[in-house]
Image (tube, grey):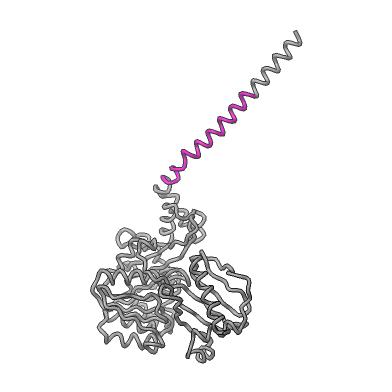
Amino acid sequence: MAFFKDIEFLRAHLYTLVEKNGSDLHIKSGACVRARIHDEIIPLDDETVTHDTVEQIARELAEKNFINFMKEKELDTIYLLDKDHRFRVNMFVHLHGLALVFRLIPKVIRTVEELNLPQAIHKISHLRRGLVLITGTTGSGKSTTLASIIEEININQRRHIITIEDPVEYVYTDKQCIIEQRTIGQHTKDFSTALRSSMREDPDIIVVGELRDIETAESVLHAANTGQLVFTTLHTTDARETIDRLIAIFPAREQNRVRMTLATNIQAIVSQRLINSIDDELIPAVEIMFMSPRIEHLIRSQADADIPDAMAEEETSFGSITFNKALFSLVLARKITEETAFNYATSASDLKLLLTTSVEYHQMKDETAPEEIHLKGEDEQKALEEEIERKKIEKQEALERLSKEI
């Protein structure tokens, strides 16, 4: 009976998360259940969850892997709440017991337009070879953006796609493409093994859920170097950091080789952050670096610091978008405030310069000027009327004094 009670406890809170349009549910020993809703962690109730309850839920989710979970101290899996709601689950051990984090995986894969992503993203779905990196912090929407790109290819092209994930998140249905999805630990041993195997499976596109170690990174670079189109994700904040971080994974003696391989094979880096909009919704600010001869030269010559400037200058010719330009566009579209833009800017001073030198920005500001002038006019008119009335009173009082004197 306790088992069913614990599972119903879990299911009830997951349904509450769905109803509140939340993204993550947090259950830990000795604390109340909390949820991430509109990018804030809030309690769903004030009931303290016992260690026994969390352990029982963990046993049910891990099943035969529970012993291995207690040995390794962490485990990734999937939980099916019902036919419409799937959750990616991370289980781990902490100072006071066990903890579980559930990430809701949307059933419907949304389009670039529905996700408010820049139109330049469409260009990525037409690439034929090389490496594409989708980056951002945890919860920034990397998997959602990647799924949108893959689904666009699935709808419009005839290609063979293999995904290697831990665990499988978005589930694809074959449309124009053949898509096979493999889960680490269930369908294959590990990322590097699955990548080596995929090279003998006639792939056009290989999707690697995440770059976690040097073996996976080496296998990804090899696949891209042999003519496949490879997508993967990385926990970095922008294009420049992504290149530096990827090279730094490798030993110093290998880094020059890796740098040359990246310069040859990177086709695009998409970096995104979710920002609270004026309407209190989370919207993406997206930086996109498309490879160009100049950026390839900068990578080869270890001049990574100059990449943002090159991207800014190549917006028209190659379609690159810097974070500052992405924030600038959101301000012009009245989706975020200037204050919010400055808080998220890579360089607040550069963003300020972009705004103050922009004709579009000043036109936007001028649109509010008539209202401001009108309000100012009302104030001046009121002050003028009060001044006239005061002078009338003073004049009347002066006449009265004069009359008395006479």
Write the start and end of the magenta stretch as one range. 363-389
At horizontal 31% and vertical 65% (from top left) the residue drawn is 122
Is residue 286 depicted above or below 183 in this figure?
above
Residue 290, how many percent across, how many down?
A: 33, 67
Magenta stretch containing residue 373, yes or no? yes
Residue 392, how many percent across, how many down?
A: 64, 20
State the predominant SS element of the stretch in magenta.
helix
Residue 24, how many percent across, how many down?
A: 50, 72
Q: Residue furthest front?
A: 1
Which of these two is toward me, 260 or 114?
Answer: 114
Q: Residue furthest left?
A: 158
At horizontal 58% and vertical 28% (from top left) the residue drawn is 384
Which of these two is toward me, 296 or 12?
Answer: 12
Q: Does residue 235 appear left or right of residue 171 in this picture?
A: right
Which of these two is toward me, 346 or 33?
Answer: 33
Figure quadrant of residue 99: bottom right
Magenta stretch containing residue 165, yes or no? no
Q: Residue furthest right?
A: 405
Which of these two is toward me, 304 or 122?
Answer: 122
Figure quadrant of residue 44: bottom right
Residue 175, how many percent across, how many down?
A: 27, 73
Q: Quadrant of the N terminus?
A: bottom right
Figure quadrant of residue 268: bottom left
Is residue 280 depicted above or below 177 in this figure?
above
Q: Quadrant of the C terminus?
A: top right
